[in-house]
Image (cartoon, rainbow, N blue to C red):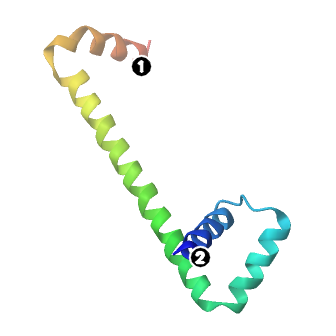
Amino acid sequence: MRTSLIETQQIEAHLLQLSEPGDALVFEARLLLEPELCDKMQWQKETYSIIRQYGRDQLKQEIEAVYQQLFTEPEHAGFRQKIMRLFSKK
């Protein structure tokens, strides 16, 4: 169990380029010698990608909700007009 956590931390440090140069070289050598470690790194990289995409999707949804609230609800008409004037051609 502990070895797995340490390995995960080493993979993360490598992926995020947080390793010291010597540690990075040792890790890269291990990647060449241990195909299983290489697979684990690929899965962790894929996981980070999915998490990043999920975060982007969440942010887009939040932005869309704010947009809908500010630009469609009558109580925000004054704000909407000010914004439209800022971006209108003069």
Q: Amino acid at mark 1?
A: Phe
The disc label shown at residue 3, or none: 2
Which residue is situated farthest in the front direction here? 2
Helix, strand or loop for disc 1: helix
Residue hosting label 1:
87
> Residue 59, image x and y in percent?
37, 42
Compared with 45, 82 (above or below) is above
**Mark number for residue 16?**
none
Q: Earlier in the sequence, mark 2 or mark 1?
A: 2
For label 1, the crowd category at 10 Å Cα-Cα, with few meaning under 14, some 14 to 19 and many 20 or more, is: few
Q: Nearer the viewer, residue 54 or 22?
A: 22
Place of residue 79 in the rendered image (x, y in percent of width and height, measured from the top left): 29, 11
Residue 12, position as x, y percentages in the image: 61, 64
Q: Position of residue 2 (x, y in %)?
A: 56, 72
Name the quarter where the C terminus is drawn. top left
Q: Which residue lies at the image location 48% right of the left edge and 63% below the top edge?
A: 49
Residue 27 left/right relative to 79: right
Q: Nearer the viewer, residue 2 or 13?
A: 2
Q: Residues within 10 Å of mark 2 (few under 14, many from 20)?
A: few
Q: Amino acid at mark 2?
A: Thr
Q: Can you say whether 23 is above or below 67 in the image?
A: below
Residue at the image point whose x is 69% and y is 84% from the top: 31
Report the mark closest to the observer, 2 or 1: 2
Q: Quadrant of residue 9?
A: bottom right
Q: Residue, x 37% and y 12% (percent of image)?
A: 85
Position of residue 70 relative to residue 64, above or below, is above
Question: From the viewer's perspective, is 42 left or right of 86?
Answer: right
Q: In percent of the image, x 72 and y 88: which residue is there? A: 32
Secondary structure under the numbered disc 2 in the rendered image: helix
Q: Is residue 38 above or below residue 69?
A: below
Residue ranking furthest to the right: 22
- Judge from the rendering whether residue 31 lies leftward or rightward of residue 29; answer left or right: left
